[in-house]
Amino acid sequence: MEKTIYIDDKPVKLKSTAGTPRRYKAQFRKDYFAELMKLAKVFNQTAENDGQFDLNTVSFEDLDHLDFEPMYNFVWVLAKTADKTIPEPDEWLDEFEAMPLADVFPQITELLESSIQSKKK
């Protein structure tokens, strides 16, 4: 699955394939699916808030799972999967003046979900 989003007014091509979780683990030494499940625990409350994530509703227990680093990592790995020429994560992130995760993350959830959904009906 592929998608182009805008980050800091720059088009960024993103792609999710079967190799994305392995690329994530090779780069960050963390399991893609475990990191995704931790984020899902925090973001599951969005359904209760009309799809809007609100930090005011995050419990202290949820704060244990709220880590922005995996969010940056997910954006990078999706971009790297789409474009093998992008640099290492920190260098790539420095290309942007800002990385508005509140705007970016809702746009990439479909790509992340596609990596764990079954095609079977």
Image (cartoon, rainbow, N blue to C red):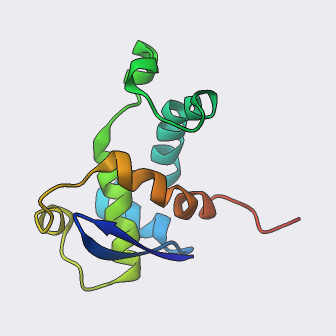
What residue is drawn where x is 37% and y is 51%?
A: 103
Near-viewer residue (51 or 81): 51
Of the 4 image quadrants, the one containing the N terminus is bottom right
Q: Is residue 59 above or below residue 84?
A: above
Q: Residue furthest top?
A: 60
Coordinates of residue 118 in the picture (x, y in percent): 75, 63
Q: In this view of the protein, can residue 31 be seen by the observer? A: no
What residue is drawn where x is 45% and y is 15%?
A: 59
Q: Is residue 44 above or below residue 13?
A: above
Coordinates of residue 27 in the picture (x, y in percent): 30, 64
Going by the image, does 108 lie left or right of 83?
A: right
Of the 4 image quadrants, the one containing the C terminus is bottom right
Q: Is residue 35 above or below residue 85?
A: above
Near-viewer residue (110 or 82): 110
Coordinates of residue 34 in the picture (x, y in percent): 50, 45
Going by the image, does 33 lie left or right of 81?
A: right
Q: In this view of the protein, can residue 36 be seen by the observer? A: yes
